[in-house]
Image (spheres, grey):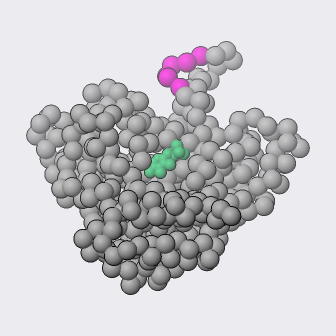
Amino acid sequence: MEKKRIWLSLAEMGGEEQRFIQEAFDTNWVVPLGPNVNGFEADLESYLQIEGKRVVALSAGTAALHLGLVMLGVGRGDEVICQSFTFSASANPIVYQGASPIFVDSEPDTWNMDPKALEAAIKDRIAKTGRKPKAIIPVHLYGMPAKMDEIMAIAQKYDIPVLEDAAEAIGSTYKGRRCGSFGAYGALSFNGNKMITTSGGGALVCPDGVAAKWVMFYATQARDEAPHYQHSHIGYNYRMSNICAGIGRGQMLVLEHHIAKRKQNHRRYMELLADVKGISVLDNPSSDFDSNFWLTCIVVDPDEAGFSREEVRLALEAENIESRPLWKPMHLQPVFSQCPFYGDGTSEALFNDGLCLPSGSLLEEEDLERVCRVIKGLPH
Ligand SMILES: *Cc1c(COP(=O)(O)O)cnc(C)c1O
């Protein structure tokens, strides 16, 4: 008999989602906007502990990043600095705005934007173009907070706003502060495989109520106030629906449970793989960092381990276990091959040797042990 499939990361419903959706049906709010959208935004605002900041629920994390760039005035001819080691959705919205991505490498502690490479990039772009980059997009990859003190200090020194990609990092904290709350704007994702899901959705953390009103305006086709349809700006259809927000409200009730479960997965992998030569598990570099451990990631040193990352992946797949190489850096993607890159090869090495292990909140102890047995059984 085929062994049970172990997935990389599956959505898990808490049970209350249907109640919020039913309420929407019962009150005939099966349209964009409505009480669940307001409720979900209020839930996120209190969860993120963002005094004065506001959250706008949107149709996707990608939409949140796009509207963040719109709000920062990014347009044709501008340059935007983006972490290279990420999912393409961090960078694509730069191109939607007619601007050019400038990619910056990662540092080895968090695998996120290297502050030194960031500053080198800013200086070089100013020298080459005579203009400052218009925005900086750091990412908290796999839930691990980026070195935000260093990044924000450089951003402030050059007076460049930060758009934080916290799509994978809801619930992660850096020096006690929740990811998504550091930048001028912060993007969250509630796609199917993220920490919590609305089936598809995202949110933009905005600096204040005025900015949030503008984001809502752009997200609902930019209709001017008039009895007829009147437009003075280009709009988007990016608002979250009241049905999706109902799922989100239910998911907020189990968010802490999901985080605890994924942190526990990470702790167990650390324990079970501790004595495997040539394998290291990404961990919080110090007590300043508290990752939600959305995905547990390993790096395989083939010389020390006696096997490669790809051999681990194939051995797991042969046992019906899903795993996935780490994100392929954007500066190595064919579509971005013309974009400038500043770095020393850290993210490329991570891509070559890194692997995401099954990390969902539904993962059971016996699943986890099965994964580690396969890895430990590889010939050295
Ligand atoms: C998932 C993800 C996004 C995009 O979010 P969607 O809701 O899927 O549009 C952006 N950035 C990162 C790092 C992501 O993982």
Q: Work out which residue is located at the far left of the displayed protein and give it.
A: 127
Q: Is residue 45 above or below residue 275?
A: above
The answer to which image quadrant residue 377 occupies is: bottom left
**Does 248 sit left or right of 21 as displayed?**
left
Q: Is residue 68 magenta?
A: no
Q: Is residue 273 visible?
A: yes
Closest to the observer, 150 or 332: 332
Closest to the observer, 63 or 69: 63
Q: Is residue 233 magenta?
A: yes
Give the residue drawn at x 19%, y 53%: 343
**Does 279 sit left or right of 321 as displayed?**
left
Quadrant where the image shows the N terminus: bottom right
| Rendering coords of residue 155 (x, y %) | 27, 53
| Rendering coords of residue 166 (x, y %) | 46, 55
Give the residue drawn at x 28%, y 43%: 332
**Does 355 sit left or right of 260 as displayed?**
left
**Does 284 sit left or right of 51 as displayed?**
left
The rendered magenta stretch, by its main secondary structure, is classed as loop
Quadrant where the image shows the C terminus: bottom left
Give the residue drawn at x 72%, y 59%: 13
Q: Is residue 104 above or below residue 148?
A: above
| Rendering coords of residue 149 (x, y %) | 31, 64
Q: Is residue 58 visible?
A: no
Q: Is residue 216 above or below residue 42?
A: above
- Magenta-tinted stretch: 230-235
| Rendering coords of residue 117 (x, y %) | 20, 55
Closest to the observer, 324 or 22: 324
Q: Work out which residue is located at the far front of the displayed protein and give it.
A: 1
Q: Count how many numbered circles sit on residues in the image.
A: 0
